[in-house]
Amino acid sequence: MKKLVSNLLLIAAISFGFASCNQAQKMIDAADQINIQCNPEVLEVIAGNIDATVSVTFPPEYFLPKATLEVTPVLLYVGGEAVGKPFTYQGEKVTDNFKTVTKNGATITEKVHFDYVPGMEKSELVGRAKVYYKGNEYVYPADIKIADGANTTYMLVNTKGSYHYLPDGYQEVIPETAEAQIMYLINSADVRGSELRSADVKDFQEALKALAGDDRREVKGTEIVAYASPDGSEALNNRLSANREKTAAKAFDKITKKLNAGEVTTKSIGEDWEGFQELVNNSNIEDKELILRVLSMYSDPNVREREIKNMSSVYQSLKTNILPQLRRARFITNVEYTNYTAEELADLVENNIDVLDEPALLRAAANVKDIDSKIAIYKQAVKKFGTDKALYNLGVACLEKGDLAAAKEALNKVADKGFGCFDNVMGVIAMREGKYADAARLFAKHADGGHEKANLAALDILNGKYADAAAKLAGTGDHNETLAYILTNQLDKASESIKGNCPYCNYKKAIIAARKGDVNAYNAAMEIVKQNEKLAERAANDVEFLKFR
Protein backbone atom coordinates (compact mmCIF):
# COMPACT_ATOMS: atom_id res chain seq x y z
CA MET A 1 0.00 0.00 0.00
CA LYS A 2 2.82 2.39 0.93
CA LYS A 3 4.54 1.57 -2.33
CA LEU A 4 1.36 2.30 -4.28
CA VAL A 5 0.91 5.63 -2.56
CA SER A 6 4.55 6.47 -3.19
CA ASN A 7 4.22 5.66 -6.88
CA LEU A 8 1.05 7.74 -7.15
CA LEU A 9 2.82 10.69 -5.57
CA LEU A 10 5.74 10.30 -7.95
CA ILE A 11 3.40 10.16 -10.93
CA ALA A 12 1.56 13.24 -9.66
CA ALA A 13 4.82 15.13 -9.21
CA ILE A 14 5.97 14.21 -12.68
CA SER A 15 2.62 15.16 -14.14
CA PHE A 16 2.73 18.46 -12.28
CA GLY A 17 6.24 19.05 -13.53
CA PHE A 18 5.18 18.34 -17.09
CA ALA A 19 2.19 20.61 -16.68
CA SER A 20 4.44 23.39 -15.40
CA CYS A 21 6.92 22.82 -18.16
CA ASN A 22 4.16 22.86 -20.76
CA GLN A 23 2.82 26.16 -19.48
CA ALA A 24 6.27 27.77 -19.43
CA GLN A 25 6.98 26.33 -22.87
CA LYS A 26 3.85 28.03 -24.16
CA MET A 27 5.40 31.40 -23.18
CA ILE A 28 8.59 30.47 -24.99
CA ASP A 29 6.79 29.16 -28.07
CA ALA A 30 4.67 32.31 -28.28
CA ALA A 31 7.71 34.64 -28.14
CA ASP A 32 7.00 35.78 -31.68
CA GLN A 33 3.82 37.42 -30.38
CA ILE A 34 5.89 39.89 -28.38
CA ASN A 35 6.30 43.21 -30.22
CA ILE A 36 9.65 44.90 -29.73
CA GLN A 37 10.39 48.43 -30.95
CA CYS A 38 13.79 50.11 -30.70
CA ASN A 39 14.52 53.83 -30.92
CA PRO A 40 16.64 54.46 -32.86
CA GLU A 41 15.82 51.59 -35.19
CA VAL A 42 19.52 51.32 -36.02
CA LEU A 43 21.79 51.84 -33.04
CA GLU A 44 24.03 54.88 -33.14
CA VAL A 45 27.27 55.73 -31.40
CA ILE A 46 27.22 59.24 -29.96
CA ALA A 47 30.26 60.55 -28.11
CA GLY A 48 31.44 56.99 -27.50
CA ASN A 49 28.10 55.80 -26.13
CA ILE A 50 25.40 53.55 -27.56
CA ASP A 51 22.04 54.41 -26.02
CA ALA A 52 18.61 53.26 -27.11
CA THR A 53 15.05 52.97 -25.85
CA VAL A 54 13.44 49.56 -26.20
CA SER A 55 9.65 49.19 -25.91
CA VAL A 56 8.30 45.67 -25.29
CA THR A 57 4.58 44.93 -25.77
CA PHE A 58 3.27 41.68 -24.28
CA PRO A 59 -0.07 40.53 -25.77
CA PRO A 60 -3.05 39.57 -23.58
CA GLU A 61 -2.94 36.09 -22.03
CA TYR A 62 0.77 35.77 -22.80
CA PHE A 63 2.27 36.14 -19.36
CA LEU A 64 1.71 33.39 -16.75
CA PRO A 65 0.47 34.94 -13.49
CA LYS A 66 3.15 33.15 -11.46
CA ALA A 67 6.00 33.46 -13.98
CA THR A 68 9.04 35.72 -13.98
CA LEU A 69 10.75 36.66 -17.24
CA GLU A 70 14.35 37.89 -17.34
CA VAL A 71 15.64 39.49 -20.54
CA THR A 72 19.31 40.40 -20.85
CA PRO A 73 20.23 42.85 -23.65
CA VAL A 74 23.40 41.74 -25.42
CA LEU A 75 25.26 43.57 -28.16
CA LEU A 76 26.92 41.04 -30.46
CA TYR A 77 29.80 42.34 -32.56
CA VAL A 78 32.85 41.17 -34.41
CA GLY A 79 35.28 39.95 -31.80
CA GLY A 80 32.99 39.79 -28.80
CA GLU A 81 29.79 40.73 -27.07
CA ALA A 82 28.72 43.28 -24.48
CA VAL A 83 26.17 42.29 -21.87
CA GLY A 84 23.78 44.91 -20.56
CA LYS A 85 21.78 45.13 -17.36
CA PRO A 86 18.94 42.55 -17.35
CA PHE A 87 15.27 43.56 -17.36
CA THR A 88 12.95 41.46 -15.23
CA TYR A 89 9.16 41.22 -15.50
CA GLN A 90 6.70 39.32 -13.32
CA GLY A 91 3.20 37.96 -13.58
CA GLU A 92 0.45 39.53 -11.50
CA LYS A 93 0.62 36.81 -8.80
CA VAL A 94 4.36 37.19 -8.22
CA THR A 95 5.11 39.30 -5.16
CA ASP A 96 8.63 40.39 -6.09
CA ASN A 97 9.47 44.00 -6.95
CA PHE A 98 9.78 43.69 -10.74
CA LYS A 99 7.67 45.29 -13.45
CA THR A 100 4.31 43.55 -13.60
CA VAL A 101 2.59 42.20 -16.71
CA THR A 102 -1.08 41.39 -16.19
CA LYS A 103 -3.21 38.92 -18.12
CA ASN A 104 -4.32 41.89 -20.25
CA GLY A 105 -0.75 42.39 -21.43
CA ALA A 106 1.42 45.48 -21.10
CA THR A 107 3.88 47.75 -22.89
CA ILE A 108 7.07 48.41 -20.96
CA THR A 109 9.88 50.75 -21.98
CA GLU A 110 13.51 50.14 -21.08
CA LYS A 111 16.79 52.00 -21.60
CA VAL A 112 19.86 50.18 -22.87
CA HIS A 113 23.41 51.48 -22.78
CA PHE A 114 26.76 50.22 -24.01
CA ASP A 115 30.19 51.80 -24.15
CA TYR A 116 31.51 51.67 -27.69
CA VAL A 117 34.49 49.47 -28.49
CA PRO A 118 35.95 48.92 -31.96
CA GLY A 119 34.01 46.26 -33.82
CA MET A 120 30.60 47.45 -32.71
CA GLU A 121 30.13 49.29 -35.98
CA LYS A 122 28.90 45.94 -37.27
CA SER A 123 26.72 44.59 -34.49
CA GLU A 124 23.32 43.29 -33.49
CA LEU A 125 21.33 44.00 -30.35
CA VAL A 126 19.55 40.88 -29.06
CA GLY A 127 17.68 39.82 -25.97
CA ARG A 128 18.51 36.60 -24.13
CA ALA A 129 15.47 35.47 -22.21
CA LYS A 130 14.63 32.90 -19.57
CA VAL A 131 11.43 32.12 -17.67
CA TYR A 132 11.32 31.23 -14.00
CA TYR A 133 8.19 29.31 -13.19
CA LYS A 134 7.38 27.33 -10.05
CA GLY A 135 11.01 26.94 -9.07
CA ASN A 136 12.27 25.95 -12.50
CA GLU A 137 14.25 27.84 -15.10
CA TYR A 138 13.35 27.68 -18.78
CA VAL A 139 15.71 29.24 -21.32
CA TYR A 140 14.53 30.65 -24.63
CA PRO A 141 16.38 28.56 -27.22
CA ALA A 142 17.34 31.52 -29.46
CA ASP A 143 18.28 35.15 -29.02
CA ILE A 144 15.51 37.64 -29.75
CA LYS A 145 16.73 40.23 -32.26
CA ILE A 146 16.03 43.82 -31.27
CA ALA A 147 18.05 46.06 -33.62
CA ASP A 148 21.05 46.36 -35.93
CA GLY A 149 23.97 48.55 -35.05
CA ALA A 150 25.88 50.64 -34.72
CA ASN A 151 26.20 53.83 -36.75
CA THR A 152 29.64 55.41 -36.31
CA THR A 153 29.38 58.13 -38.97
CA TYR A 154 30.41 60.86 -36.50
CA MET A 155 33.80 59.16 -36.26
CA LEU A 156 34.56 60.46 -39.74
CA VAL A 157 35.20 63.82 -38.04
CA ASN A 158 38.55 65.35 -38.91
CA THR A 159 40.40 66.15 -35.68
CA LYS A 160 43.68 67.22 -37.26
CA GLY A 161 42.54 70.74 -36.50
CA SER A 162 42.43 74.05 -38.30
CA TYR A 163 45.45 76.35 -37.87
CA HIS A 164 47.75 78.60 -39.85
CA TYR A 165 51.30 79.80 -40.16
CA LEU A 166 52.18 83.38 -39.33
CA PRO A 167 52.44 85.52 -42.49
CA ASP A 168 56.00 85.68 -43.77
CA GLY A 169 55.90 89.39 -44.70
CA TYR A 170 57.42 88.60 -48.08
CA GLN A 171 56.54 91.08 -50.84
CA GLU A 172 56.54 89.72 -54.36
CA VAL A 173 56.54 93.29 -55.67
CA ILE A 174 58.13 96.03 -53.57
CA PRO A 175 57.30 99.70 -54.28
CA GLU A 176 60.33 101.98 -54.30
CA THR A 177 61.02 105.60 -55.21
CA ALA A 178 63.85 107.63 -56.63
CA GLU A 179 63.46 111.21 -55.46
CA ALA A 180 65.02 114.67 -55.67
CA GLN A 181 63.83 118.19 -54.97
CA ILE A 182 64.68 121.72 -56.05
CA MET A 183 64.41 124.69 -53.74
CA TYR A 184 63.02 128.17 -54.50
CA LEU A 185 63.68 131.56 -52.99
CA ILE A 186 60.88 133.27 -51.09
CA ASN A 187 58.04 134.52 -53.32
CA SER A 188 59.84 133.18 -56.44
CA ALA A 189 59.01 130.51 -58.99
CA ASP A 190 62.30 130.82 -60.86
CA VAL A 191 64.50 127.71 -60.99
CA ARG A 192 68.11 128.55 -60.23
CA GLY A 193 70.86 126.81 -62.18
CA SER A 194 72.58 125.79 -58.98
CA GLU A 195 69.53 123.72 -58.06
CA LEU A 196 69.76 121.75 -61.29
CA ARG A 197 73.43 121.02 -60.53
CA SER A 198 72.85 120.05 -56.90
CA ALA A 199 74.08 116.73 -55.48
CA ASP A 200 70.46 115.75 -54.90
CA VAL A 201 69.59 116.15 -58.57
CA LYS A 202 72.78 114.37 -59.70
CA ASP A 203 71.99 111.39 -57.46
CA PHE A 204 68.50 111.33 -58.92
CA GLN A 205 69.89 111.24 -62.47
CA GLU A 206 72.25 108.41 -61.56
CA ALA A 207 69.38 106.46 -60.03
CA LEU A 208 67.36 106.76 -63.25
CA LYS A 209 70.39 105.61 -65.28
CA ALA A 210 70.79 102.57 -63.01
CA LEU A 211 67.13 101.67 -63.42
CA ALA A 212 67.59 101.38 -67.18
CA GLY A 213 69.86 98.35 -66.72
CA ASP A 214 68.00 96.74 -63.82
CA ASP A 215 65.87 93.78 -64.90
CA ARG A 216 64.20 93.51 -61.51
CA ARG A 217 63.03 97.13 -61.36
CA GLU A 218 60.43 98.83 -63.53
CA VAL A 219 59.70 102.57 -63.69
CA LYS A 220 55.97 103.14 -63.24
CA GLY A 221 55.88 106.94 -63.61
CA THR A 222 56.96 110.21 -62.03
CA GLU A 223 55.10 112.81 -59.98
CA ILE A 224 56.18 116.45 -59.86
CA VAL A 225 54.73 118.08 -56.76
CA ALA A 226 55.10 121.82 -56.06
CA TYR A 227 54.62 123.62 -52.72
CA ALA A 228 54.70 127.03 -51.07
CA SER A 229 55.69 127.79 -47.49
CA PRO A 230 52.72 128.83 -45.28
CA ASP A 231 53.77 132.44 -44.73
CA GLY A 232 52.02 135.25 -46.51
CA SER A 233 48.48 135.20 -47.86
CA GLU A 234 46.91 131.91 -48.87
CA ALA A 235 45.91 133.25 -52.31
CA LEU A 236 49.46 134.38 -53.04
CA ASN A 237 50.93 131.09 -51.97
CA ASN A 238 48.49 129.11 -54.09
CA ARG A 239 49.50 131.12 -57.18
CA LEU A 240 53.15 130.73 -56.27
CA SER A 241 52.80 126.97 -55.90
CA ALA A 242 51.01 126.72 -59.27
CA ASN A 243 53.81 128.66 -60.99
CA ARG A 244 56.42 126.45 -59.35
CA GLU A 245 54.55 123.43 -60.74
CA LYS A 246 55.09 124.80 -64.26
CA THR A 247 58.74 125.79 -63.85
CA ALA A 248 59.56 122.52 -62.09
CA ALA A 249 58.12 120.56 -65.01
CA LYS A 250 60.37 122.43 -67.44
CA ALA A 251 63.38 121.88 -65.19
CA PHE A 252 62.57 118.19 -64.95
CA ASP A 253 62.58 117.89 -68.76
CA LYS A 254 66.12 119.36 -68.82
CA ILE A 255 67.61 117.01 -66.21
CA THR A 256 65.96 113.82 -67.55
CA LYS A 257 66.77 114.05 -71.27
CA LYS A 258 67.33 110.49 -72.59
CA LEU A 259 66.36 109.07 -69.16
CA ASN A 260 63.28 106.95 -68.62
CA ALA A 261 61.07 108.50 -65.97
CA GLY A 262 57.82 106.97 -67.18
CA GLU A 263 54.64 108.96 -67.54
CA VAL A 264 54.98 112.34 -65.81
CA THR A 265 52.17 113.99 -63.87
CA THR A 266 52.27 117.34 -62.08
CA LYS A 267 50.47 118.66 -59.03
CA SER A 268 50.35 121.89 -57.01
CA ILE A 269 49.75 121.50 -53.27
CA GLY A 270 49.74 125.18 -52.24
CA GLU A 271 50.70 125.93 -48.65
CA ASP A 272 52.59 122.95 -47.24
CA TRP A 273 51.15 122.69 -43.74
CA GLU A 274 51.76 118.95 -43.66
CA GLY A 275 55.44 119.42 -44.39
CA PHE A 276 55.56 122.26 -41.86
CA GLN A 277 54.15 120.03 -39.13
CA GLU A 278 56.58 117.23 -39.96
CA LEU A 279 59.62 119.51 -39.88
CA VAL A 280 58.58 121.11 -36.61
CA ASN A 281 57.86 117.74 -35.04
CA ASN A 282 61.33 116.47 -35.97
CA SER A 283 63.11 119.63 -34.81
CA ASN A 284 64.46 120.84 -31.49
CA ILE A 285 62.88 124.25 -31.90
CA GLU A 286 61.76 126.09 -28.78
CA ASP A 287 58.01 125.84 -27.99
CA LYS A 288 57.65 122.98 -30.47
CA GLU A 289 54.70 121.47 -28.57
CA LEU A 290 52.89 124.82 -28.51
CA ILE A 291 53.27 125.19 -32.30
CA LEU A 292 51.96 121.69 -32.87
CA ARG A 293 49.02 122.37 -30.58
CA VAL A 294 48.11 125.44 -32.64
CA LEU A 295 48.13 123.30 -35.79
CA SER A 296 45.78 120.80 -34.17
CA MET A 297 43.44 123.49 -32.79
CA TYR A 298 42.93 125.51 -35.96
CA SER A 299 42.26 124.38 -39.51
CA ASP A 300 41.98 127.84 -41.12
CA PRO A 301 45.39 128.65 -42.70
CA ASN A 302 45.12 132.36 -41.97
CA VAL A 303 44.36 131.74 -38.29
CA ARG A 304 47.23 129.29 -38.06
CA GLU A 305 49.68 131.77 -39.55
CA ARG A 306 48.46 134.58 -37.28
CA GLU A 307 48.74 132.51 -34.13
CA ILE A 308 52.22 131.29 -35.02
CA LYS A 309 53.44 134.81 -35.85
CA ASN A 310 52.17 135.91 -32.46
CA MET A 311 54.82 133.64 -30.97
CA SER A 312 57.43 136.23 -31.66
CA SER A 313 60.08 134.42 -29.63
CA VAL A 314 60.13 131.45 -32.02
CA TYR A 315 58.88 132.88 -35.29
CA GLN A 316 62.35 134.09 -36.29
CA SER A 317 63.64 130.53 -35.88
CA LEU A 318 60.80 129.24 -38.06
CA LYS A 319 61.62 131.79 -40.78
CA THR A 320 65.28 130.75 -40.73
CA ASN A 321 65.16 126.97 -40.23
CA ILE A 322 61.74 125.64 -41.24
CA LEU A 323 59.96 127.78 -43.83
CA PRO A 324 62.78 127.85 -46.46
CA GLN A 325 62.65 124.06 -46.66
CA LEU A 326 59.01 124.22 -47.77
CA ARG A 327 59.63 126.40 -50.86
CA ARG A 328 60.22 123.50 -53.19
CA ALA A 329 59.20 121.10 -55.89
CA ARG A 330 59.71 117.35 -55.60
CA PHE A 331 60.51 114.85 -58.35
CA ILE A 332 59.22 111.41 -57.29
CA THR A 333 59.81 108.49 -59.66
CA ASN A 334 57.82 105.43 -58.62
CA VAL A 335 59.49 102.08 -59.17
CA GLU A 336 58.39 98.47 -58.70
CA TYR A 337 60.99 95.95 -57.62
CA THR A 338 60.10 92.35 -58.56
CA ASN A 339 61.28 90.07 -55.77
CA TYR A 340 62.56 86.50 -56.12
CA THR A 341 60.18 84.02 -57.72
CA ALA A 342 59.37 80.71 -56.05
CA GLU A 343 61.84 78.98 -58.37
CA GLU A 344 64.57 81.50 -57.55
CA LEU A 345 63.94 81.15 -53.83
CA ALA A 346 64.23 77.37 -54.09
CA ASP A 347 67.53 77.71 -55.96
CA LEU A 348 68.90 80.20 -53.43
CA VAL A 349 67.98 77.91 -50.53
CA GLU A 350 70.07 75.20 -52.16
CA ASN A 351 72.99 77.28 -53.38
CA ASN A 352 73.15 80.68 -51.66
CA ILE A 353 70.84 80.71 -48.66
CA ASP A 354 72.82 83.42 -46.86
CA VAL A 355 71.58 86.13 -49.25
CA LEU A 356 67.97 85.62 -48.14
CA ASP A 357 66.47 87.86 -45.51
CA GLU A 358 63.93 86.48 -43.05
CA PRO A 359 60.77 87.15 -45.10
CA ALA A 360 62.38 85.50 -48.13
CA LEU A 361 63.49 82.49 -46.09
CA LEU A 362 60.05 82.09 -44.54
CA ARG A 363 58.44 82.33 -47.98
CA ALA A 364 60.85 79.71 -49.29
CA ALA A 365 59.73 77.41 -46.47
CA ALA A 366 56.06 78.11 -47.19
CA ASN A 367 56.57 77.20 -50.86
CA VAL A 368 58.04 73.79 -50.08
CA LYS A 369 55.63 70.85 -50.16
CA ASP A 370 57.85 68.23 -48.52
CA ILE A 371 57.32 68.64 -44.79
CA ASP A 372 60.84 67.61 -43.77
CA SER A 373 62.35 70.15 -46.17
CA LYS A 374 59.94 72.78 -44.85
CA ILE A 375 61.03 72.08 -41.27
CA ALA A 376 64.70 72.23 -42.28
CA ILE A 377 64.26 75.71 -43.78
CA TYR A 378 62.38 76.96 -40.72
CA LYS A 379 65.22 75.66 -38.56
CA GLN A 380 67.63 77.65 -40.73
CA ALA A 381 65.49 80.75 -40.20
CA VAL A 382 65.47 80.19 -36.44
CA LYS A 383 69.24 79.70 -36.41
CA LYS A 384 69.95 82.76 -38.57
CA PHE A 385 67.37 85.24 -37.27
CA GLY A 386 66.10 83.72 -34.01
CA THR A 387 62.77 85.50 -34.28
CA ASP A 388 59.52 84.51 -32.62
CA LYS A 389 57.83 84.27 -36.02
CA ALA A 390 60.37 81.72 -37.27
CA LEU A 391 60.00 79.69 -34.06
CA TYR A 392 56.23 79.73 -34.26
CA ASN A 393 56.19 78.60 -37.87
CA LEU A 394 58.70 75.86 -37.06
CA GLY A 395 56.30 74.61 -34.37
CA VAL A 396 53.37 74.65 -36.78
CA ALA A 397 55.39 72.73 -39.39
CA CYS A 398 56.22 70.07 -36.79
CA LEU A 399 52.52 69.90 -35.94
CA GLU A 400 51.73 69.46 -39.63
CA LYS A 401 54.17 66.55 -39.72
CA GLY A 402 52.52 65.03 -36.66
CA ASP A 403 55.57 65.41 -34.39
CA LEU A 404 53.71 66.80 -31.39
CA ALA A 405 56.73 66.73 -29.06
CA ALA A 406 58.82 68.86 -31.45
CA ALA A 407 55.87 71.16 -32.06
CA LYS A 408 55.41 71.81 -28.36
CA GLU A 409 59.14 72.33 -27.86
CA ALA A 410 59.22 75.11 -30.46
CA LEU A 411 55.87 76.68 -29.58
CA ASN A 412 56.51 76.81 -25.83
CA LYS A 413 59.40 79.19 -26.55
CA VAL A 414 56.91 81.78 -27.84
CA ALA A 415 54.16 81.12 -25.28
CA ASP A 416 54.35 84.64 -23.85
CA LYS A 417 54.87 86.57 -27.08
CA GLY A 418 51.26 87.63 -27.51
CA PHE A 419 50.43 85.68 -30.64
CA GLY A 420 46.63 85.46 -30.79
CA CYS A 421 46.88 82.20 -32.71
CA PHE A 422 49.07 80.53 -30.07
CA ASP A 423 46.16 79.26 -27.98
CA ASN A 424 44.50 77.80 -31.05
CA VAL A 425 47.51 75.81 -32.19
CA MET A 426 48.12 74.52 -28.66
CA GLY A 427 44.44 73.54 -28.60
CA VAL A 428 44.97 71.57 -31.82
CA ILE A 429 47.81 69.69 -30.14
CA ALA A 430 45.59 68.95 -27.14
CA MET A 431 42.81 67.75 -29.44
CA ARG A 432 45.18 65.39 -31.24
CA GLU A 433 46.30 64.05 -27.87
CA GLY A 434 42.69 63.35 -26.93
CA LYS A 435 42.67 66.04 -24.23
CA TYR A 436 39.36 67.46 -25.39
CA ALA A 437 38.57 69.51 -22.28
CA ASP A 438 41.94 71.29 -22.52
CA ALA A 439 41.43 71.82 -26.24
CA ALA A 440 37.97 73.33 -25.71
CA ARG A 441 39.32 75.73 -23.09
CA LEU A 442 42.07 76.94 -25.41
CA PHE A 443 39.79 77.32 -28.43
CA ALA A 444 37.22 79.22 -26.37
CA LYS A 445 39.72 82.03 -25.66
CA HIS A 446 39.20 83.26 -29.22
CA ALA A 447 35.92 81.57 -30.06
CA ASP A 448 35.04 84.07 -32.81
CA GLY A 449 38.15 83.25 -34.83
CA GLY A 450 37.67 81.18 -37.95
CA HIS A 451 40.16 78.47 -37.00
CA GLU A 452 38.98 78.32 -33.40
CA LYS A 453 35.32 78.10 -34.43
CA ALA A 454 36.07 75.22 -36.80
CA ASN A 455 37.99 73.40 -34.08
CA LEU A 456 35.20 73.91 -31.55
CA ALA A 457 32.83 72.43 -34.13
CA ALA A 458 35.02 69.33 -34.37
CA LEU A 459 34.73 68.96 -30.59
CA ASP A 460 30.96 69.49 -30.86
CA ILE A 461 30.79 66.53 -33.23
CA LEU A 462 32.85 64.39 -30.88
CA ASN A 463 30.50 65.35 -28.05
CA GLY A 464 27.32 64.67 -30.01
CA LYS A 465 26.37 68.35 -30.40
CA TYR A 466 25.72 68.05 -34.11
CA ALA A 467 23.40 71.04 -34.50
CA ASP A 468 25.94 73.31 -32.81
CA ALA A 469 28.65 72.06 -35.14
CA ALA A 470 26.50 72.63 -38.22
CA ALA A 471 25.76 76.20 -37.13
CA LYS A 472 29.46 76.96 -36.58
CA LEU A 473 30.55 75.46 -39.90
CA ALA A 474 27.75 76.77 -42.16
CA GLY A 475 29.25 78.13 -45.37
CA THR A 476 32.86 77.78 -44.21
CA GLY A 477 33.94 75.02 -46.57
CA ASP A 478 35.63 73.32 -43.64
CA HIS A 479 36.27 69.58 -44.07
CA ASN A 480 33.78 68.83 -41.28
CA GLU A 481 30.93 70.94 -42.70
CA THR A 482 29.48 68.17 -44.84
CA LEU A 483 29.67 65.71 -41.96
CA ALA A 484 27.82 68.10 -39.65
CA TYR A 485 25.01 68.40 -42.20
CA ILE A 486 24.82 64.61 -42.56
CA LEU A 487 24.66 64.15 -38.79
CA THR A 488 21.78 66.65 -38.59
CA ASN A 489 20.14 64.95 -41.60
CA GLN A 490 20.36 68.10 -43.75
CA LEU A 491 21.17 65.98 -46.77
CA ASP A 492 20.65 68.61 -49.48
CA LYS A 493 22.99 71.03 -47.71
CA ALA A 494 25.45 68.19 -47.23
CA SER A 495 25.44 67.47 -50.98
CA GLU A 496 25.92 71.14 -51.83
CA SER A 497 28.86 71.49 -49.45
CA ILE A 498 30.96 68.70 -51.00
CA LYS A 499 33.54 70.27 -53.29
CA GLY A 500 36.08 67.53 -53.99
CA ASN A 501 35.96 64.11 -55.65
CA CYS A 502 38.45 62.21 -53.50
CA PRO A 503 37.58 58.88 -51.81
CA TYR A 504 36.76 60.67 -48.54
CA CYS A 505 34.41 63.07 -50.30
CA ASN A 506 32.76 60.17 -52.07
CA TYR A 507 32.33 58.27 -48.82
CA LYS A 508 30.15 61.13 -47.64
CA LYS A 509 28.38 61.15 -51.01
CA ALA A 510 27.69 57.43 -50.55
CA ILE A 511 26.18 58.04 -47.08
CA ILE A 512 23.94 60.77 -48.47
CA ALA A 513 22.87 58.54 -51.37
CA ALA A 514 22.19 55.60 -49.03
CA ARG A 515 20.04 57.74 -46.74
CA LYS A 516 18.11 59.03 -49.74
CA GLY A 517 17.82 55.56 -51.26
CA ASP A 518 19.58 56.68 -54.45
CA VAL A 519 21.15 53.44 -55.73
CA ASN A 520 22.85 54.94 -58.77
CA ALA A 521 24.49 57.75 -56.81
CA TYR A 522 25.54 55.25 -54.16
CA ASN A 523 27.17 52.93 -56.68
CA ALA A 524 28.97 55.80 -58.44
CA ALA A 525 30.37 57.10 -55.17
CA MET A 526 31.35 53.66 -53.93
CA GLU A 527 33.44 53.01 -57.02
CA ILE A 528 35.73 55.85 -55.97
CA VAL A 529 35.58 54.91 -52.27
CA LYS A 530 36.98 51.46 -53.13
CA GLN A 531 40.17 53.11 -54.38
CA ASN A 532 41.06 53.68 -50.72
CA GLU A 533 41.69 50.39 -48.92
CA LYS A 534 40.96 51.79 -45.46
CA LEU A 535 37.66 53.34 -46.54
CA ALA A 536 36.65 50.24 -48.48
CA GLU A 537 37.15 48.16 -45.33
CA ARG A 538 35.08 50.61 -43.31
CA ALA A 539 32.31 50.62 -45.91
CA ALA A 540 32.05 46.83 -45.72
CA ASN A 541 31.04 47.09 -42.07
CA ASP A 542 29.21 50.42 -42.11
CA VAL A 543 25.58 50.12 -41.05
CA GLU A 544 24.84 53.20 -43.19
CA PHE A 545 25.05 50.89 -46.20
CA LEU A 546 23.25 47.91 -44.65
CA LYS A 547 20.31 47.96 -47.07
CA PHE A 548 22.66 47.97 -50.07
CA ARG A 549 24.55 44.86 -48.98
Image (cartoon, rainbow, N blue to C red):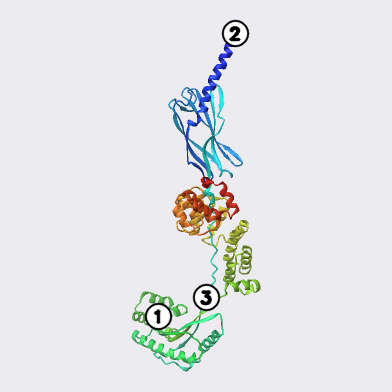
Q: Is residue 158 above or below residue 170?
A: above
Residue 380 in which image quadrant: bottom right
Residue situated in front as seen by the camera: 175 or 497: 497
Dot 2 or dot 3: first in sequence order is 2
Q: Quadrant of the N terminus?
A: top right
Which residue in the structure is indicated by mark 2? Answer: 4
Dot 1 or dot 3: first in sequence order is 3
Residue situated in front as seen by the camera: 441 or 260: 260
Q: Amino acid at mark 2?
A: Leu
Q: Is residue 99 above or below residue 201?
A: above
Which residue in the structure is indicated by mark 3? Answer: 173
Q: Residue at x 60, y 53 (%)?
A: 533
Residue 468, given in percent of the width and then of the height, sits at 45, 51
- Calculate the distance from the C-alpha at mark 2 to the C-alpha at mark 3: 118 Å
- Calculate the distance from the C-alpha at mark 1 to the C-alpha at mark 2: 136 Å
Residue 4 in which image quadrant: top right
Q: Amino acid at mark 3?
A: Val
